[in-house]
Image (spheres, grey):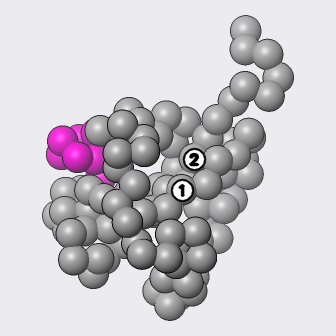
């Protein structure tokens, strides 16, 4: 059994090479999930639009909070999502090397 406080859940945003589309997801293993997206094992959407580049993520201790945040972000306008990403990642660098 894991000690309290060791759970990690992530809400993440992927984009394509030209930063034209965004994909928002939630996972308990960001490295594994990112690998899956890069290798065509992710969602149909990420495969179709080639969303393989991580530009944003948030960590949560509780899965219900991560899922609520994912739903919240999915309801936002593209402009608001762009502002969120830019606040943490002003140059929209691909954060892939940071997560493996």
- Callout 1 touching callout 2 (CB < 8 Å): yes
The image's mark for residue 11 is: none
User: Between 44 and 61, which is closer to the camera in this rendering?
Assistant: 61
Q: In the shown orientation, is residue 18 left or right of residue 7? A: left
Give the residue displayed 64% in from the left and 70% down from the top. 72
Give the residue displayed 34% in from the left and 60% down from the top. 94
Which marked residue is nearer to the observer: mark 1 or mark 2? 1
Q: Is residue 87 above or below residue 31?
A: below
**Label 1 residue SS:** strand
Q: Position of residue 61 (x, y in %)?
A: 74, 39
What range is drawn magenta here?
Answer: 36-43
In this figure, which residue is indicated by the disc labeled 1? 57
Q: Is residue 30 magenta?
A: no
In this figure, which residue is indicated by the disc labeled 2? 10
Q: In the shown orientation, is residue 46 left or right of residue 84? A: left
User: Between 3 and 64, which is closer to the camera in this rendering?
Assistant: 3
Q: Position of residue 44 (x, y in %)?
A: 24, 56
Q: Is residue 27 above or below residue 75?
A: above
Q: Is residue 27 above or below residue 70?
A: above
Whether residue 62 is visible: yes
Quarter of the image that includes the C terminus? top left
Q: Main secondary structure of the magenta part?
A: loop
Give the residue displayed 73% in from the left and 9% down from the top. 1
Q: In the shown orientation, is residue 10 left or right of residue 16? A: right
- Crowding near the residue tagged with mark 1, few <14, some 14–19, many ≥20 C-alpha atoms within 10 Å: some
Q: Position of residue 62 (x, y in %)?
A: 74, 41
Whether residue 74 is visible: no
Q: Is residue 37 magenta?
A: yes
Give the residue displayed 29% in from the left and 77% down from the top. 19
């Amino acid at each position: 059994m894991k000690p309290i406080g060791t759970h990690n859940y992530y809400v993440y945003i992927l984009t394509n090479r030209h930063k034209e589309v965004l994909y928002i997801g939630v996972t308990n293993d960001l490295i594994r999930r990112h690998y899956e997206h890069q290798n065509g094992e992710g969602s149909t959407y990420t495969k179709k639009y080639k969303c393989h580049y991580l530009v944003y993520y948030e960590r949560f201790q509780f899965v219900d909070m991560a899922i609520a945040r994912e739903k919240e972000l999915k309801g936002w306008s593209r402009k608001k999502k762009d502002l969120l990403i830019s606040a943490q990642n002003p140059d929209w660098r691909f954060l892939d090397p940071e997560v493996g």
